[in-house]
Image (tube, rainbow, N blue to C red):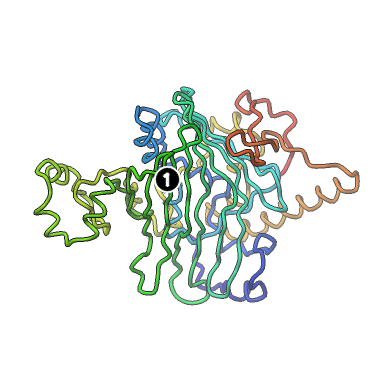
Amino acid sequence: MISRNNFSVWNILKKCIGMELSKIAMPVVFNEPLSFLQRISEYMEHTHLIHKACSLSDSIDRMQVVAAFAVSAVASQWERTGKPFNPLLGETYELTREDEGYRLISEQVSHHPPISAFHAESLKKEFEFHGSIYPKLKFWGKSVEAEPKGTMTLELLKHKEAYTWTNPMCCVHNIILGKLWIEQYGTVEIVNHRTGDKCVLNFKPCGMFGKELHKVEGHIQDKSKKKRRVIYGKWTECMYSVDPKVYEAYKKISRQVFLLLLKPEMKSEEADEMPEVQETVTVIPGSALLWRITPRPAHSAQMYNFTSFAITLNELEPSMERLLSPTDCRLRPDIRAMENGDIDLASSEKERLEEKQRAARRERSKDEEEWSTRWFQMGTNPHTGAEDWLYTGGYFDRNFTDCPNIY
């Protein structure tokens, strides 16, 4: 990681209080060597949860695993205080993971406002996961707030089910002084459009004394609004599920009394679920573990706090170059220069690419031409009825002859 000690974010941001940050050119030193399209692909780090949901026969069981997946999708943001590179218009990112049984394609479909669309699909036709994100960033003096506008849609094809939700707000604190830290907050509502089941998750703001930091609590209700499961944990660590009656009883009385009243079979279940790693989540006896974060590599703090998954995302093996679209982020010279530690080259390449993009826009407006997206088009999400960017197919046929020259 490149040291930021000699750079002040405040010098750049003091003119921008309350403004939309996507229009502000930030020095490359505040970036991390990934494009925002690569950052989106980190939603797929815990794909095993989708595979698990596909294998379950009960809709409430599926919902709780989908809820864990929705929480896990934001877990990689913990301590990631570098800003990803803004994708260029027409930029793409492909991630094919045969070991995990899926492939993903994303494209920057709009520059102002910045919109990134993605589509992931199971190699065995078990699921599709897609959406588009329009990150609205605002600076509030001491913090930067990011609102990830856009809907996530997960389709479990065997069960003919579609789940939709939106991601929580994200805030980076101590932009000017002190150690940067991140919190996620807001209500996330996951809807199963086939059964009417709903999961309401509350990502809690940190509060006055930090007691609520990283906490997530919520419940699953069926279509008759009956509470079926309570879900709790931390988005930085783990998520558990427990029967609502057990949860209420535990809240009312002390842990010691609760343990005395427990049925023997629930005590043994608790012993099975005791975490081997040190967690800061108090586990209610009788709870089932839904998800636990993958530990980061030992040297993560020196590598932009990347997860093991994120570290692989910019890897370019010799055999890959002939298969990739020429618009793939791995081929971006500014990101590659930053990864190699050459900050001057990264900075000059970033400026060159941005100027090239502006010149292309001027050319189009002179010829009164509209930008046309390559792999996605605006349509209607069949589950929500709202406008959405939908994958038109064809990327993996690898016909890239009419892709734009953006680098």
The x and y percentages for residue 224 are 42, 40
Q: Would you place residue 143 above or below residue 320 in this image?
A: below
The answer, for residue 407, to whether it is visible in the render is no
The x and y percentages for residue 237 are 33, 53
- Seen from the viewer's position, the closer of residues 144 and 203 is 203
Q: Residue at x 59, y 29 (%)?
A: 323
The answer, for residue 151, to whether it is visible in the render is yes
- The picture quadrant where one finds residue 181 is bottom left
Residue placed under numbered mark 1 in the picture = 199
The x and y percentages for residue 300 are 39, 55
Is 381 left or right of 63, judged from the image as shown?
right
Q: Would you place residue 246 above or below residue 54 in this image?
A: below
Q: What quarter of the picture does the C terminus occupy?
A: top right
Badge 1 marks a residue whose secondary structure is strand
Q: Residue at x 53, y 56 (%)?
A: 32
- The picture quadrant where one finds residue 70 is top left
Q: Residue at x 62, y 36 (%)?
A: 381
Tag 1: residue type?
Answer: Cys
Callout 1: few (<14), some (14-19), or many (20+) C-alpha neighbours within 10 Å?
Answer: many
The x and y percentages for residue 160 are 48, 26
- Seen from the viewer's position, the closer of residues 13 and 147 is 147
Q: Would you place residue 304 above or below residue 62 in this image?
A: below
As drawn, the residue found furthest toward the front would be: 224
- Give the number of callouts: 1
Is 203 left or right of 128, judged from the image as shown?
left
- Seen from the viewer's position, the closer of residues 214 and 104 is 214
